[in-house]
């Protein structure tokens, strides 16, 4: 496998032993598919972070562990790498463990591997489950700070991400301006992502005040993935019929729009989250009315700063703050995002 990095560098990036990396790189026997995939991913990460590798300063290894659809993980990885040179004199080296679906036991195993091999911090997007909370506490007790991103977990050191309560309230306001009665469909990826649950709770409370005649129906088991989301929404539409508005909290919007088209349902307003490639296209086509956006680069910058403060590598006042929600229409897509829409 052609590469230009030292085996030790690849091993540190992959979180594997040098012996395992050597076997993978030289095509030797007794290599698991997981190890081979991790080495390949590490080579890509090193290539993208090459400029950062040449920087001077203390190296801080940060593990970024995410359960999310690939379209979102791709944006988060881009943001995590984009701000590497903006957090003081240290050299941050992120290692990524990105999965579309992780069971509680898989997430626990991942966090335990990180604890065993060592890390200076973890940026975590995971469901708020008892076993995950226990592993977060164990990492922090071991001196490895855990900062949650986008969705919080009880017991984490800090949270970096959007104001989920504000997001739900904004979505309710946008919908209530156009729909005063009828049916509103809400779609979560999972009920145990705390951030999504907060959005839905705030949305329902605000909509009850702004449009009390509106009736809500919900789906919450699509995982944000297109095939499963299509089935979940299709089932609801078969039972329900007319839907006058959609608030998509957990993604899978191509699938939701396709299910609406198949059922010949055209909502008056459709509110989604995040400016990934799918949502940019749907926004341009008019299938999605508004996208609620928050700056992932700012979120990752804040997450890194929380970790550095934990280790007393930066000074100053306590870092804090939530990302404000921005309402995006086709006319005001941020230039930086528009320029990446073809990636």
Image: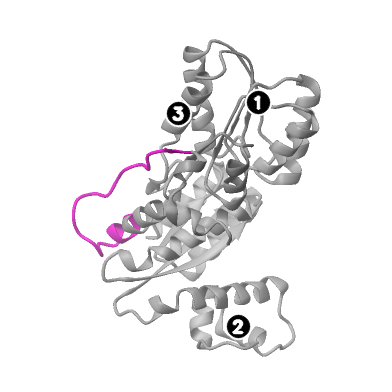
| 315 relative to 41 in the view: left or right | left
Label 3: few (<14), some (14–19) or many (≥20) C-alpha neighbours in 10 Å: many
Disc 2 versus disc 3: distance between alpha carbons? 48 Å
The magenta-colored residue range is 306-328
Disc 1 versus disc 2: distance between alpha carbons? 52 Å
* 269 versus 64 height, above or below: above
- Mark 1 or 3, closer to the camera: 1
Q: Tell me which corner region of the image, top left, top right, bottom left or bottom right, holds residue 50.
A: bottom left
Q: Which residue was labeled with disc 2?
A: 21
- Mark 1 or 2, closer to the camera: 1
Q: Which residue was labeled with disc 1?
A: 267
Q: Tell me which corner region of the image, top left, top right, bottom left or bottom right, holds residue 226.
A: top right
Question: Do tag 1 and tag 2 residues touch (Cβ < 8 Å)?
Answer: no
**Residue 324 percent location from the top left of the image:** 37, 39
**Residue 259 percent location from the top left of the image:** 76, 35
Was residue 247 drawn as part of the magenta stretch in this picture? no
Please, what is the dominant secondary structure of the magenta stretch? loop
Q: Which residue was labeled with disc 3?
A: 170
Residue nearer the viewer, 311 or 82: 82
Q: Residue at x 43, y 49 (%)?
A: 334
**Residue 3 percent location from the top left of the image:** 57, 87
Residue 211 at least partly seen: yes
């Amino acid at each position: 496998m052609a590469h230009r990095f030292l085996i030790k560098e690849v091993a540190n990036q992959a979180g594997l032993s040098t012996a395992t990396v050597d076997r993978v790189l030289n095509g030797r026997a007794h290599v698991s598919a997981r190890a081979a995939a991790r080495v390949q991913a590490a080579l890509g990460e090193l290539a993208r972070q090459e400029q950062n590798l040449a920087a001077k300063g203390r190296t801080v290894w940060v593990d970024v562990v995410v359960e999310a659809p690939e379209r979102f993980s791709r944006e988060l990885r881009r943001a995590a790498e984009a701000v590497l040179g903006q957090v003081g004199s240290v050299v941050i080296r992120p290692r990524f463990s990105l999965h579309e679906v992780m069971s509680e036991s898989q997430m626990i195993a991942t966090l335990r591997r990180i604890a065993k091999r060592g890390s200076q911090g973890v940026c975590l997007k995971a469901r708020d489950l008892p076993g995950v909370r226990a592993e977060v506490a164990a990492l922090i007790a071991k001196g490895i700070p855990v900062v949650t991103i986008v969705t919080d977990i009880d017991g984490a050191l800090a949270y970096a991400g959007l104001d989920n309560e504000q997001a739900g309230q904004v979505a309710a306001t946008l919908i209530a301006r156009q729909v005063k009665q009828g049916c509103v469909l809400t779609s979560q990826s999972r009920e145990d992502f705390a951030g999504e649950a907060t959005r839905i709770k705030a949305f329902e409370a605000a909509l009850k005040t702004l449009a009390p005649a509106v009736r809500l129906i919900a789906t919450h088991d699509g995982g944000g993935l297109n095939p499963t989301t299509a089935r979940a929404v299709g089932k609801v539409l078969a039972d329900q019929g007319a839907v006058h508005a959609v608030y998509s909290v957990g993604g899978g919007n191509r699938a939701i729009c396709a299910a609406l088209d198949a059922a010949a349902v055209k909502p008056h307003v459709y509110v989604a989250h995040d400016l990934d490639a799918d949502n940019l296209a749907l926004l341009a086509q008019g299938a999605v009315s508004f996208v609620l956006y928050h700056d992932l680069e700012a979120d990752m910058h804040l997450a890194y700063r929380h970790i550095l403060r934990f280790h007393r590598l930066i000074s100053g006042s306590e870092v804090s703050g939530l990302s404000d929600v921005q309402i995006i229409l086709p006319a005001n897509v941020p230039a930086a995002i528009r320029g990446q829409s073809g990636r």
